[in-house]
Structures are given as structure tokens and as C-alpha cells.
């Protein structure tokens, strides 16, 4: 886990690797340098459309392209995708047009730009839309692989990427990365930590700290929030009997919410949610924000102890 | 299809009858904007649209995007007249499971290429269709119909700017300038001042016509077809509810159905004998 890379760079690389498909087109809203679609634009200008600073138009131009047989990849900051939420709802999800929306710079991990740029609700809102697949990969390699699988979906998607670098975990493990399937990174029987995005590596750190105290934790990278890998959650409940979720997102409606919905409908286990406790962020470095929001490995470890204590 | 002016007028009259019948049967819907747009859509489909009613998904068809999708009875009537759907299908307007959903929907009705219902979305969608046609090196055109109240939505102007920036000359817009929106006259709700100047300032070619005069409509459609180096808009001055006296220029019939007496009067005015 020594090398570091940003998931947004995985997205940018995936677009380049998808370019052999002549139906792949890229839409930008003046943030291609940030979301990393710029590499595609440089190499394939005729298949890249600048929508200016106009997210609503971008989403629906994508819908028109998708309705005409193209595979549009549109990106901007996660927070600014939300301006076009109704376009995503009525113009993309409702007619089930395969527009692939990427929101970069998601979460408080985004850092010093401050609260206006730290989307903490994107995963929740897109999860409520029928037909839409929702993903938040944890590392460069999984972002690359998941993005490359999108043309095969034939339905719309939302993927959150992060601005800042995170440990690269999946080099050589590409074949394990499949949309809709959680990845077990570590096996234990005392507690299962289900995480997404930048908190996956924090969860691994927490599991390592727990191991030193004799507690064996399973860690799952749940990169796809919808459709949720319910079979995997069921097996985690029977193996571990206690669950922790970890996400750089509001505890309302995101990964924790999705897992809670699944648990109450299927099987029971105590659940502790690590996430942003329904508040806005502020300017700070990534590591400072994870501390301020109480969502780094230390807090995941504490949540694991609480979850284990609640086992009946 | 080659139709004379009087044949086009008869085409539109038959559609008007169907519009009023649909709204009357459903006791809901939007007759005013359907009647204001109907001469335009009738002429567009009957004389310009390159479509195959027996093959509604034919790849190189021209696209028509009814952005003011609440005015769906107008489009359904034309689709029935063209043979995309049957006149019997018109009875499914606003009925559970029906092809004729309240707002036109590409997932429900053959011949519909856009799922409408939320204003301000059709121009961007049409832009995407037009860009796709250009990438395909296809001659197909995309026609978008906007309502005048609709252009109060800010995203319409995002699309207008983008279409001109990318010089999307296969994108052709018709604006149904009927001067009434949901609650009241546009002048009361949100004054739009010089609409042609706004589109020109955004880089579009603009022409204004009387949207109920078939000869002017034909020359307006000629203008749209002839403008290929940049996007073009035909601003059609219309009367909301045109053809039914008590609906004309009457905000109450933006979204209201006629009662029995009004229905009988409308049929008589439209020259339709109801058994």
C-alpha cells in the first residue's frame, strides 16, 4: 500500500482506455482539468463537448447523445452535479438513458476549498433515483476498472471520485473489481467494517489496530452502493455478528443508510455508522477534516468496539 | 408528404378536434397550448419531418422534441394522423397503462423521442441529439418546440449558448409564443422583453411568423431548413386555445378541461358533428 494516487486520475485514465469505442463521448463543465477528463479532450477533441459552466445543460445534452446511441461521460465536482439533480432525475434516470456522471472532489476529504465544495449528500440523493447505479471507489485501480465497465451497464450511473491521493490497493487484483460486488480486503470474525471511498484505507488501518488488541475485523470495500451487495452483507452478519460502516458522507442516506435498510429488511446485527454527523465542513487539510468530522481510523476503531459490545 | 395549404389546414382542424376530445374524455390536461402549437406541428410533420411511422426507431429519422411536454394532446393527435399510433390510442390519454401519458414520454409512445414533463429540458436534449447526428455524419435534423413561458427557465439559455458556441446548425427550434403560462399572462408572471433580440444576442438566426397562417408557417419552416451554419429559431406568434372561442387567449384553459356544454360548443366551432 505504498504508492498513492487520486481516484480522479483513475477516471481520467479509464476515459483514455475507453476511447477505442467510437461511441464514447466526453462532456465537461469547465472542470475537466480537475475531474481529469482533460486527457481525453486533448487526444479526442472532436468527441469532447465543453458545456461551459452549465451543469444542467450538460446532463441533458448527455441524455440526447445517449438516446442517439452514444455513451456519454459527463463530469464536474460532485457538489455541482447536484445543481442538475432534476435533470438527472427527469431527463436521464426516468427514461433510463445511459449517461455516466462522475462527481469528483466528493466528501470533506476535498479539503481546503471548504464546505461549499465538500459534497456530503451526493451518494444519498443519487441512490434514491430508480435505474441509477451509484459508486464510490476507493483507489486508482478500482476507479479505472469500474469506469471501464460502465459502457456495459446500459443504464445511467453516478460515480464519486476524490480530489486527493489515497493508497493504491488493487494493483494486480483487477479481476476482483466488478460493479455491484463488494471486495473483502481482510477476513475476521469479530466485526465487519464496510467502507467506501477514501475511508476504505482508513478502515484497513483500523483493522490493523484492532488486530493488535486481539480483535479480528473483516474489511469490505463496498464501492457500489447501488445495487448493494446484499448477499455479502448477509454473510458478514453470520460471520461477524456486528457491522460498522465508514464513509466520508452524511450518515443519512449514504452507505450507512443503505446497509441499515438492508439489515432491517433481511437479517439483524448491531450497526455503528461512521460518517459525517449531519453537519457541514470547513477549510482544512484532508487529514484534518477526517479528524474534525471524526471519521478517520481512530473513530472507526472506536465504532468497532461499540458494535462488538452490542452483540447479544 | 406534399399537402396543399388547405389540406394542411384540414389536417390541423382534425387534430384540434382530437385535442379537445382527449382533454374532455380525461377531464384533465392542457388544451390551450396544444391548440396554439397545432398548426406548427401539423405542418412540420406533414411536410418536413423525415420519419417512418411504421419504423418509429429508424436511426436516421429527424427528431422532434416537444419540450413543452404538457401540450401532449397536440403531439398525440399529429402522431395518430401520421400513423405512428391509432386514433383508438388517443383514448389512452392520461389512462393507466396508456401510450398517451400525461406528458409525452419516449418510453411509452411510438414516435416520441423525448420524455418531457419538466420545462426547460428539451433544448438541451435536442442539442445532444443534434450533436450525435453530427458525430454520425447524418443528415437528420432535430426540431425542438419550446413554450414561451418555458424560456424563463435558466437552463434554456445554457443550451442556447452551447448550441451557438458549437455551431450546431442541425438544431432547429420553434417557439410557441402564445403569451400565456400556467398562472396568468406571461406579461404578469415574468416579462421577457425583446425575445427575438435575446436569441440573436445568443448567436442564433431568428425569424418571426404568424403561427396560425399556414403560408407563413411554410416559409418559416423553409427558413429553419435553410439555416445550417448555426442554430435557428422560428418565433411563432400564436393564440393560446386557437380555434375554440372560449379558450382563446384565456389563461383558464391552460390546464383545464371543457364541461359537457363547452365540449359541444367546441365541437360545433371546429366543424365536428358529434353523434
Image (tube, helix red, strand yellow):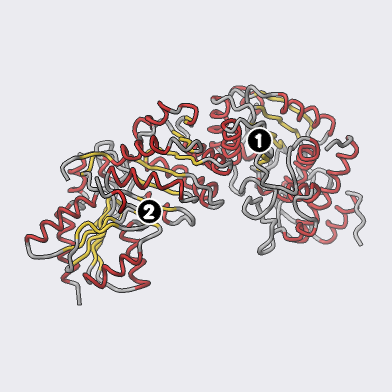
Res A274 → quadrant: bottom left
The picture places residue A18, in percent across and down from the top left corner, at 42, 38
Q: On the rendered structure, is B2 left or right of A98? A: right
Give the residue furthest to the bottom: A312
Q: Which residue is depicted at the point 55% across and 26% down?
A: B166
- Label 2 environment density (alpha carbons within 10 Å; few <14, some 14–19, many ≥20): many
Q: Nearer the viewer, mark 1 or mark 2?
A: 2
**In the image, residue A265 above or below residue B213:** below
Res A310 → quadrant: bottom left
The picture places residue A34, in percent across and down from the top left corner, at 34, 33
Identify the disc placed on residue A179. Answer: 2
- Name the foreground residue: A23 vs A215: A23
Identify the disc placed on residue B142. Answer: 1
- Name the foreground residue: B165 vs B154: B165
Q: Is there any visible trace of residue B12 in the rendered image?
A: yes
Identify the disc placed on residue B102. Answer: none
**In the image, residue A77 above or below residue A226:** above
Q: Which residue is depicted at the point 62% across and 48% down?
A: B116
Amino acid at each position: 500500500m505504498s504508492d498513492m494516487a487520486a481516484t480522479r486520475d483513475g477516471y481520467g485514465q479509464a476515459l483514455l482506455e475507453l476511447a477505442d469505442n467510437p461511441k464514447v463521448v466526453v462532456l465537461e463543465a469547465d472542470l475537466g482539468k480537475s475531474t481529469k477528463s482533460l486527457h481525453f479532450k486533448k487526444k479526442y477533441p472532436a468527441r469532447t463537448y465543453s458545456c461551459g459552466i452549465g451543469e444542467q445543460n450538460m446532463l441533458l445534452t448527455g441524455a440526447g447523445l445517449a438516446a442517439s446511441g452514444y455513451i456519454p461521460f459527463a463530469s464536474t465536482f460532485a457538489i455541482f452535479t447536484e445543481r442538475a439533480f432534476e435533470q438527472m432525475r427527469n431527463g436521464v434516470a426516468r427514461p433510463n438513458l445511459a449517461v455516466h456522471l462522475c462527481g469528483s472532489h466528493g466528501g470533506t476529504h476535498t479539503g481546503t476549498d471548504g464546505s461549499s465544495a465538500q459534497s456530503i449528500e451526493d451518494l444519498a440523493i443519487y441512490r434514491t433515483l430508480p435505474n441509477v447505479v451509484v459508486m464510490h471507489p476507493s483507489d486508482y485501480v478500482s476507479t479505472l476498472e469500474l469506469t471501464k465497465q460502465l459502457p456495459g451497464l446500459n443504464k445511467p450511473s453516478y460515480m464519486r471520485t476524490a480530489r486527493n491521493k489515497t493508497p493504491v490497493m488493487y494493483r494486480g487484483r483487477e479481476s476482483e473489481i466488478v460493479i455491484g460486488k463488494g471486495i473483502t480486503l481482510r477476513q475476521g470474525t469479530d466485526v465487519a467494517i464496510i467502507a467506501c471511498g477514501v475511508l476504505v484505507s482508513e478502515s484497513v488501518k483500523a483493522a490493523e489496530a484492532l488486530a493488535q488488541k486481539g480483535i479480528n475485523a473483516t474489511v469490505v470495500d463496498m464501492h457500489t452502493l447501488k445495487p448493494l451487495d446484499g448477499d455479502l452483507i448477509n454473510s458478514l452478519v453470520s460471520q461477524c455478528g456486528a457491522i460498522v460502516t465508514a464513509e466520508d458522507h452524511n450518515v443519512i442516506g449514504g452507505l450507512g443508510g443503505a446497509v441499515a435498510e438492508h439489515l432491517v429488511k433481511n437479517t439483524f446485527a448491531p450497526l455503528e455508522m461512521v460518517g459525517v454527523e449531519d453537519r457541514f465542513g470547513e477549510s482544512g487539510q484532508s487529514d484534518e477534516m477526517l479528524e474534525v468530522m471524526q471519521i478517520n481510523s481512530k473513530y472507526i476503531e472506536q465504532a468497532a468496539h461499540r458494535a462488538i459490545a452490542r452483540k447479544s | 408528404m406534399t399537402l396543399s395549404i388547405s389540406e394542411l389546414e384540414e389536417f390541423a382542424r382534425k387534430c384540434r378536434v382530437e385535442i379537445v376530445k382527449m382533454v374532455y374524455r380525461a377531464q384533465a390536461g392542457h388544451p390551450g397550448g396544444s391548440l396554439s402549437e397545432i398548426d406548427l406541428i401539423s405542418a412540420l410533420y406533414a411536410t418536413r419531418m423525415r420519419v417512418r411511422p411504421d419504423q418509429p426507431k429508424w436511426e436516421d429519422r429527424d427528431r422532434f422534441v416537444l419540450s413543452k411536454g404538457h401540450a401532449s394532446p397536440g403531439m398525440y393527435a399529429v402522431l395518430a394522423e401520421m400513423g405512428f399510433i391509432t386514433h383508438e390510442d388517443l383514448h389512452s390519454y392520461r389512462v393507466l397503462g396508456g401510450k398517451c401519458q400525461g406528458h409525452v414520454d419516449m418510453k411509452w409512445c411510438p414516435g416520441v423521442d423525448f420524455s418531457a414533463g419538466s420545462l426547460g429540458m428539451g433544448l438541451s436534449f435536442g442539442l445532444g441529439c443534434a450533436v450525435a447526428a453530427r458525430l454520425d455524419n447524418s443528415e437528420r435534423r432535430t426540431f425542438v418546440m419550446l413554450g414561451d413561458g418555458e424560456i424563463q427557465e435558466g437552463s434554456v439559455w445554457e443550451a442556447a449558448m452551447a448550441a451557438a458556441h458549437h455551431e450546431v446548425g442541425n438544431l432547429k427550434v420553434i417557439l410557441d409564443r402564445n403569451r400565456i403560462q400556467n398562472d396568468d399572462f406571461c406579461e404578469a408572471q415574468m416579462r421577457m422583453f425583446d425575445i427575438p433580440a435575446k436569441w440573436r444576442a445568443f448567436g442564433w438566426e431568428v425569424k418571426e411568423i404568424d403561427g396560425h397562417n399556414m403560408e407563413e408557417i411554410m416559409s418559416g419552416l423553409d427558413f429553419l431548413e435553410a439555416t445550417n451554419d448555426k442554430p435557428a429559431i422560428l418565433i411563432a406568434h400564436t393564440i393560446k386555445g386557437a380555434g375554440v372561442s372560449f379558450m382563446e387567449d384565456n389563461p383558464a384553459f391552460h390546464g383545464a378541461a371543457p364541461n359537457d356544454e363547452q365540449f359541444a360548443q367546441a365541437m360545433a366551432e371546429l366543424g365536428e358533428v358529434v353523434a
